[in-house]
Amino acid sequence: MKYWRETLAVAQRILLELVRRQRSLICWSIFPVSILLINGLILAERTQLSNAQAFEAAAPLTLVGAALFFSCLGGSIATVVAEREQQTLKRLAISPLSGTSYFLGIFLAYSLIGLGQTLLVYFVAAFAGAQFQGSLWLGGLVILLSIMTYVGGGFCLGTQFARRTEDVNALVSAFGVPLLILGGAFIPISFFPEILLDIAQFNPIYHMNEALFGVAADGKGLEAIAPHFRVLVACAGVMVAGGWLSYRRMLQMERRL
């Protein structure tokens, strides 16, 4: 119960700070809606799909391929860097709050933000006539694994490579934008030459997009998306473990400074 209460307290503090600042939450709301509308209208025009079918195809790509990337990965990097600059981590060392609870609290906060974006994207898509075709629990599991991968990656990048707030945009741009494009978030995979398709197999965002698209737009089950699902499980495990180890190393360094 102690860890649970502390985790909730950390998540609540982070969410309250975001609500007070408002800018990040507003941008994380505007961005996925605008990308969804653009992708949906392009697909409807170029593929001769109905609006409902176009938005069914655009929604999963917009959500895991773009929205969760900037909120869960970019947001977790920004949180880690801000906490370091404000010396919150130093105060953590002399407080009764455990490092585990702090780590889990950040995970919980960005998981809730990801859930909010999921509801927003599919509400807008449903307004255009789209429907979630497959299993809700399987789609939710794919989204959860995507959030875990992004937040774990955010901890890895934020603790190892970012020292100031100015570093956040550089990190997200350098590491993220190429991965987003190769993952099919902005350009359909069907347009890729063979060499880029081969490279995309090593990109977790590609597997996120393919897995959620298969479930949400095509109504596929676990067996049909199994290759992508296995990669997602592995990526989520590696990123969470790497994020935890990076976080523990950062705490040790902060205590010595």
Image (tube, rainbow, N blue to C red):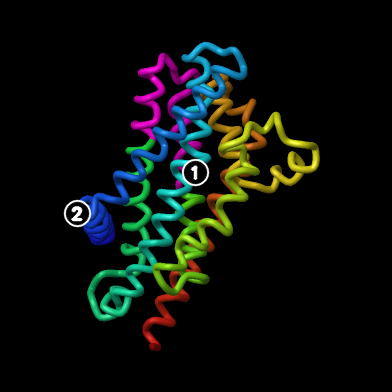
Residue 111 percent coordinates (x, y):
37, 46
Residue drawn at x 43%, y 25% as measured from the top left: 136
Q: Mark 1 sits on what residue?
A: 145
Main SS of the magenta segment?
helix
Sequence-wise, the earlier of marks 1 and 2 is 2
Q: Is residue 213 visible in this depiction of the protein? A: yes
Which numbered circle lies on residue 20? 2
117 or 37: nearer the eye? 37
Q: Is residue 138 visible in this depiction of the protein? A: no
Residue drawn at x 57%, y 19% as measured from the top left: 218
| Magenta-span inclusion, residue 221 | no
Q: State which region is magenta.
A: 118-147
Residue 16 percent coordinates (x, y):
21, 54
Residue 177 percent coordinates (x, y):
57, 50
| Magenta-span inclusion, residue 129 | yes
Residue 21 drawn above or below residue 85: above
Residue drawn at x 34%, y 51% as measured from the top left: 108
Q: Write down the quadrant of residue 98 in the picture.
A: bottom left
Number of dots carrying numbers: 2
Residue 220 drawn above or below residue 239: above
For label 2, the crowd category at 10 Å Cα-Cα, with few meaning under 14, some 14 to 19 and many 20 or more, is few
- At mark 2, the secondary structure is helix
Query: What amino acid does circle 2 point to?
Result: Arg
